[in-house]
Amino acid sequence: MSAAATATPFARLPADPARATLALIAGFTALRIAFAAMLGFGVDESYTLGQARHVALSYFDHPPLHLWLAHASMLIFGTTWAVRLPFIVMFAGTSWLMFRLTERLFGGWPAVWSVLALNCSLFFLASPGTWIVPDGPLLFFLAGGMLALARLFFPAEDEAPSPWRSWLLAGLCFGLAGLSKYSAVFVIAGLAVFLIATEHRRWLVHPAPYIGALVAALCVSPIVIWNLANDWASLKFQAGRGGGRGLTLAAFAQMLAGQFVWLAPWIAVPLATIFGASFARLREPRVLFCLSLAAPTILYFTVQSLWSGWALPHWPMPGWFFVFPLLGAWMVANPDASPSPGAWAKWCLGLAVALPLVIGGIGATGILTRFGVPVRADPTIDAFNWTELRPLLVARGVGPRSGPVVVALTWNEGGKIDLAVGDRADVMVIGPDPRGFAFRQVQRAYLGADILIVALAGTWARQQQALQSQFVVIGEPERVSIGRGGRPELDLVIVPAKGLRSRAPVSVAVAR
């Protein structure tokens, strides 16, 4: 059996690594398109699309690049599932950059394995690969910047890369990564560690990296300008999410378990094992390069959960992204491992195809609730669009430039409502956590306009007492239900109100 035959994940793939990778990328792109067409927008996506209707230099939750991309996509596709297409195409590009980066470091077939494993991981398959989230642009530009520098750091025998071209391209990519998500800084910090720890520290006395850094700074300048104008609200919000609450082992355990699930257990176990084992190979520059890029993000966000009291398991994922080249190299170097890499690859691919199609089918049909599963137990309940709310509000006078202002009580419900009617009416949030709504509240909403409060029944029950002091008059709540296929699944209330007492509700002032 040839070396290539033992290295390839599947015998039916083309014998050339680049062609094999293109076949994998095409297949996963088709899978993502099917998944995107079946599943409605999640809470974060709904909120993002609503915020993206209003173009700004930056935004409260995140830097602006993915919102700018979403805005442009909505101009073409509206708010249909197809608005996800640019993000799907971008991750196809990210997969190709992963191939080229791993090929540069470890060879062609390790690169095929890294692309396969990356796309089979649940997080990378769904979130940056399909959904409208900042991680998609973040990974694309981080991969592009690191590939530009890998060509400089590890040139082939017949290559003489231009340091100016390499550093300027890297600076542009890193700036655009910073324009995507603040956590890009941890990967860049890892690059600095690699430079200082290796012979490549010589670049620290060359002007090219500093001009590249200037390019990066220009790219992220919209974030700085927006934060200057808004009392650094976005940076304060993100910094506050890591606040100290004392030692919290439960949060740490949840963080570890969350990463295990998000990566997919069949990917997480070999990936974490290889990540740990690779620290014994720090003298190998190519291994050190990957570990330097991966470790700061993984370790900081994982350990941070010990004192922050909580953390989201997708935060370390940009670090895990740079472990996949090491996994690809291991797979080729260990063809006789047990279980065999070939068998592992078949299981990974089978699960990667089945899970999104099953989840997408559940989300599209609501089949679980149709057969009596409680709504709260349906994993897709947050991923259906509240389109049935739109005609209910139109029937109550909501319309462009006229009619009542629509008010939500939480940012996540506000995102769902905004996606349904935000192109037709003003939507604001006056609950305790308005997020980005606090920076786009329409002033006329504060001047005694008629208002319709829309909330989930449970949210209304928790907050109605506090709302009594916010309005001169609050009417009787009207209960309505929405769901998939015309079946009632979520209970809402629509409450008429008049006379909002303050032009700047207390919750808005606190958010600033």
Image (tube, rainbow, N blue to C red):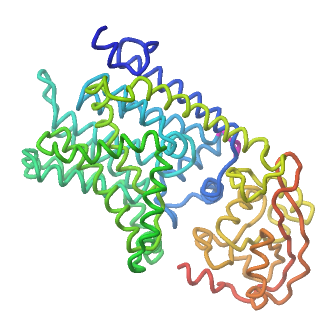
Residue 417 figure quarter? bottom right
- Expressed as whole percent of the image width and height from the top left, the position of residue 22 reads 44, 22
Residue 235 shows in the view: no
Farthest top residue in view: 1
Left or right, residue 20 beside residue 187: right
Residue 188 shows in the view: yes
Residue 462, placed above or below residue 208? below
| Magenta segment includes 49 | no
Left or right, residue 317 beside residue 105: right
Q: Considering depth in this image, is 434 or 449 the residue closer to the camera?
A: 434
Q: Which residues are magenta?
A: 78-82
Left or right, residue 209 beside residue 404: left
Q: Considering depth in this image, is 353 or 23 the residue closer to the camera?
A: 353
Magenta region, main secondary structure: loop
Give me the residue at 44% from left, 25% from top. Answer: 343
- Expressed as whole percent of the image width and height from the top left, the position of residue 271 reads 36, 42
